[in-house]
Image: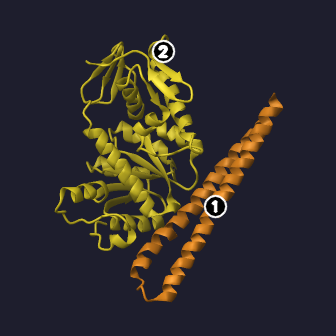
Amino acid sequence: MDALADMARDMRAAADETAHALKGSLATIQSSIEPLRRAVPADNLRARRALELIEAALGRLKDVVDAAHQRDCAVAAAIERGQNSARR
Amino acid sequence: MTTLQKESASTWSNSNLALAPSATGQADQVESSTGARVKLVLVDDDADYREAASAELTELAFDVFAFASGDEMLEYFAQNNDADIIVLDWKLPAGLGIDLLPKLHDRGIRLPVMFLTGMPATAYESAALDRGALDFVDKARGVPILAKRIRLILDSHRRARETPAKTALACGKLTLRPDVSRAFWDNKDVSLTVTEFNIVHLMVSHAGEHVTYRSIYDCVHHAGFVAGNGDEGYRTNVRSSIKRIRNKFRALDGEFAEIENFPAFGYRWRTGPAQPA
């Protein structure tokens, strides 16, 4: 039973670690877009559109990271619940 | 790192971040709440993020001192440097960012601390808040959001400092010393953290009346701050803080029963009213 508890804990720690690492890189991209946005002239439509696409993709990546993190935590919680009910 | 901002209007739309002194009192107020330069210490082991975030924060009227590790930050403070706020990455190579809180505390550095996380921090939030952390921000939400949250925190700190109540309060066996954020029970120091002290101070200021979960939470954060799971998550955080506070009083006095719960509403300090000590 303790092996299951360890597994749930490791799973949650790994999910946190991965989400944190990915978000760090996404945050760097997000922050680095800002000076580019300021530098791109309003009439450079292609470059403006490129920035929009980067941001849209960034938004989707953040959602994927959050969803994966939530899913892993939900599985870890389900393991813990199963273990607790088995104890009773 | 301290280049003057030039184009902040385009990065921080809908707010007045002008650095030039304003002519009217009202404009001054806007500036002091959103635009005064803030000295910020950032600790993050990711060099790229440090560089990108520091540059953006500088654009948004922050003077940034960025470090790769907690030790470097402690060294900075050891050299008699100061700051208005500390922003710590949740995970640092030497361990969790919250492990730096007691080290700062031991060195007498009591600045507001915010954490950058990469995930909803519910699991650790309560522990970190109890140890004096003030806020959590998902770093991927971008620097403008981070900057806004920092200013909200500093504003609430400033307001807390400006409110009077610097005089000691007595309430039965309890004495509160707001000037040093210390609570004494029967003349013995209860060893509350600053956050815990603020909660007790709020309840004692309203002794005999009930204080809502929300107002307890807001007294240690800025109004409207929501942590935990969903809208009710903050109640869990308040409950765990109250439990910790009760345990500290009970360690001095097993009979301690001054903090009463009113389920689904909040808490009250039983006896009152408080008198100037």
Mark 2 vs 1: CB contact within 8 A: no
The crowding category of the residue bearing disc 1, from other C-alpha atoms within 10 Å (few below 14, some 14 to 19, many at least 20), is some
Percent across and percent down for residue B221 are 42, 42
Which residue lies at the image location 54% right of the left edge and 73% below the top edge? A55
Which residue lies at the image location 32% right of the left edge and 48% below the top edge? B155
Task: Give, as a three-letter code, the residue at label 2.
Answer: Ala
Q: Secondary structure at mark 2?
A: loop
Q: Is residue B64 left or right of residue B140?
A: left
B125 over A14 or under it: above or below: above
Q: Secondary structure at mark 1?
A: helix
B193 over A63 or under it: above or below: above
Q: Is residue B171 left or right of residue A11?
A: left
Give chain A's shade. orange
Q: Residue furthest right?
A: A86
Which residue lies at the image location 77% right of the left edge and 33% below the top edge? A84
Percent across and percent down for residue B254 are 49, 12
Give chain B's shade. yellow
**In this rendering, the label closer to the viewer, 2 or 1:** 2
Q: Which residue is mark 2?
A: B257
Q: Residue furthest left?
A: B23
B26 over B206 or under it: above or below: below
Percent across and percent down for residue B116 are 48, 54
